[in-house]
Image (cartoon, helix red, strand yellow):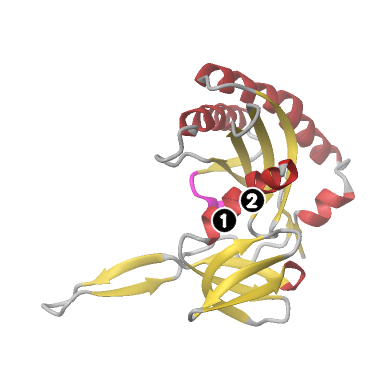
């Protein structure tokens, strides 16, 4: 159960991006499927609803997932309003290379839904990390996940013992890793300070390894688009 919870935490931003509406899934053979992503398991498959029919696709066959979930009204003249689907512009759709490379763009994610009682603790941690990353300038911090090469996630869990997790993920490859975790509590100040600790002990060492070319082969494989 604990392992399942960890997987869910690091996949949250992937689900938030892909499940918000219509998505285009490009397969490695060039086929493009359009539908609503119902589930993403980075170690197995994605489930996509195409015209009411759910289909599972192995992650090994997926090249890219692009959200196309923005709707705009057509109000020309006095005709009745018609809702149309408009593709979201992805400035990185043709990107090839290591997603975590210095100078690339990162989105800082936290589970900050208004319905989530832990939102303020997640947000406090995420904002602390965002401020530190903006200050060090190693990556370019962006405001939308579609603009990012990858995502850094700060998630608080109190379902059993109180824990906070720091992970790195990218919906572009469907991969994710936990880079730090620690006990926490329901305190904004505690989570703000813990996030700073995560930055010093998790993010900074990762940046140094990237800069020196000492990153593990698994991370390079999981976060590289060829």
Q: Which mark is residue 11?
A: 2
In the image, residue 212 above or below residue 52: above
Q: Is residue 145 magenta?
A: yes
Q: Secondary structure at mark 2?
A: helix
Question: Does the stretch in magenta take in 42?
Answer: no
Image quarter where the N terminus lies is top right
Residue 146 in view: no
* Residue 76 visible to an observer of this rendering: yes
- Is residue 133 placed above or below 13 in the rendered structure? above
Say if mark 2 contacts mark 1, CB within 8 Å: yes
Q: Closer to the camera, 26 or 141? A: 26
Residue 122, percent across and down?
53, 32
Task: Say which of 47 and 59 sits in front.
Answer: 47
In depth, the one of 71 and 188 nearer the eye is 188
Q: Residues within 10 Å of mark 1 (few under 14, many from 20)?
A: some
- Classify residue 160 by image quadrant: top right
- Residue that mark 1 sits on: 15
Residue under the image location 63 percent in, 34 percent down: 137
Numbered disc 1: secondary structure: helix
Q: In the shown orientation, is residue 65 left or right of residue 204? A: left
> From which residue to which does the magenta span run?
143-148
User: Residue 74: which quarter of the image?
Assistant: bottom left
Going 77% across and 65% down the picture, which residue do you hit?
226
| Mark 2 closeness class: few <14, some 14–19, many ≥20 residues within 10 Å | many
Real-space Cα distance between discs 2 and 1? 6 Å
């Amino acid at each position: 159960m604990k392992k399942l919870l960890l997987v869910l935490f690091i996949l949250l931003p992937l689900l938030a991006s892909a499940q918000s509406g219509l998505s285009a899934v490009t397969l490695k053979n060039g086929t493009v499927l359009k539908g609503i992503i119902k589930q993403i398991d980075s170690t197995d498959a994605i489930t996509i609803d195409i015209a009411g029919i759910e289909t599972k696709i192995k992650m090994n066959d997926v090249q890219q997932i692009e959200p196309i979930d923005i709707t705009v009204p057509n109000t020309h003249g006095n005709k009745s309003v018609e809702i149309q689907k408009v593709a979201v512009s992805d400035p990185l759709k043709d990107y090839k290379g290591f997603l975590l490379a210095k100078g690339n763009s990162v989105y800082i994610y936290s589970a900050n839904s208004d319905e989530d009682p832990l939102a303020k603790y997640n947000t406090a941690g995420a904002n602390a990390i965002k401020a530190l990353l903006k200050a060090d300038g190693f990556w370019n911090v962006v405001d939308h996940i579609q603009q990012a090469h990858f995502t850094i996630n700060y998630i608080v869990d109190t379902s059993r013992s109180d824990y906070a997790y720091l992970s790195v993920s990218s919906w572009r490859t469907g991969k994710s890793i936990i880079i730090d975790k620690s006990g926490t509590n329901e305190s904004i100040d505690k989570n703000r300070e813990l996030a700073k600790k995560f930055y010093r002990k998790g993010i900074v060492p990762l940046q140094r390894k990237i800069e020196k070319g000492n990153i593990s082969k698994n991370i390079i494989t999981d976060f590289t688009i060829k």
